[in-house]
Amino acid sequence: MTSRHTRTFEDLLAEGAAVPTEGWDFSWFEGRATEARPAWGYARAMAGRLAGATAAVDIQSGGGEVLDFALGAAGPQAPALTVATEGWPPNIAKATALLRPRGVAVVASPEDAPLPFADAAFDLVVSRHPVRPNWPEIVRVLEPGGTYFAQHVGPRSVFELVEYFLGPQPEQQSSDRHPDRERAGAEAAGLEIVDLRAERLRMEFYDIAAVVHFLRKVIWMVPGFTVEAYEPRLRALHEQIESEGPFVAHSTRHLFEARKPSH
């Protein structure tokens, strides 16, 4: 079998452009890209929170993979009621297929819409990489004493790759993702911060197919990305990887735990 190291630029480009992008399963990247994981182990930590909850909602669940893992790890201690929201139709279908056998209903809800639930419906709200937390809505659907437990994408995440394609970006572009700003937003909505910690994590891309698939999957990195539009930059990056080794970038993540006051 031909290894990826001897395959042509055109072959790798075509492969990266053909891989389905639904869900948040990143197993295709194995051997082609790596990303260090935060020390807190969010999916397993989520399982611990689920084991102590009675009613939970996973906001912007993607393809449902993280919630599926966490519910499996929580086992019989999982909440009696768990639901998930998702806004992208291919992910809604994927999450429904994955989560329905666990008794989880997936509710179609755009990321910028009010949450389609009654006040104080849940004692636990979880989310992995929400686009933008809607703090007033999170507070509204939490019962008094309830918990928000999430992993957020931090500021300037993978910006080495973003700026390779787009050039230098203004600092304020991702400042709304800064943990301090999110803390202020959560507190202004009435939440009490229990835990907030951040990490910067090394990523490596070993071939151009991995870069193409990543930018097709994480569409907000390089808005409007297509292979055709960025072919010259992709070819230059392919040659750089071939001659110098993996392209190195850094993701930023923060763990966010907050509580709605019980009074």
Image: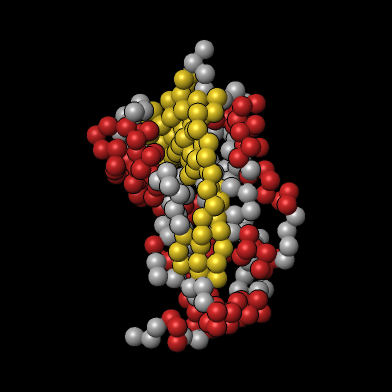
From the viewer's side, name the closer residue of 221 and 100.
Answer: 221
**Residue 231 appears in the rendering:** no
**Residue 190 appears in the rendering:** yes
Q: Residue at x 59, y 59 (%)?
A: 158
**Residue 92, x across and y down, in percent:** 46, 49
From the viewer's side, name the closer residue of 261 and 72.
Answer: 261
Task: Answer above or below: position of 150 versus 158.
Answer: above
Question: Furthest-left residue in view?
Answer: 76
From the viewer's side, name the closer residue of 45 and 200.
Answer: 200
In the picture provided, is 222 more to the left or to the right than 208?
right
Question: Furthest-top residue in view?
Answer: 263
In the picture provided, is 77 more to the left or to the right than 161?
left
From the viewer's side, name the closer residue of 233 and 204.
Answer: 204
| Res 23 quadrant in image | bottom left
Task: Answer above or below: position of 146 versus 209.
Answer: above
| Res 51 quadrant in image | top left
**Residue 231, x across and y down, in percent:** 64, 78
Q: Quadrant of the N terminus?
A: bottom left
Q: Residue at x 32, y 40 (%)?
A: 71
Q: Residue at x 62, y 70 (%)?
A: 226
Task: Answer above or below: position of 240 versus 39.
Answer: below
**Residue 212, x across and y down, in percent:** 55, 70
Number of marks in picture:
0
Task: Answer above or below: position of 22 versus 60.
Answer: below
**Residue 262, x across and y down, in percent:** 49, 16
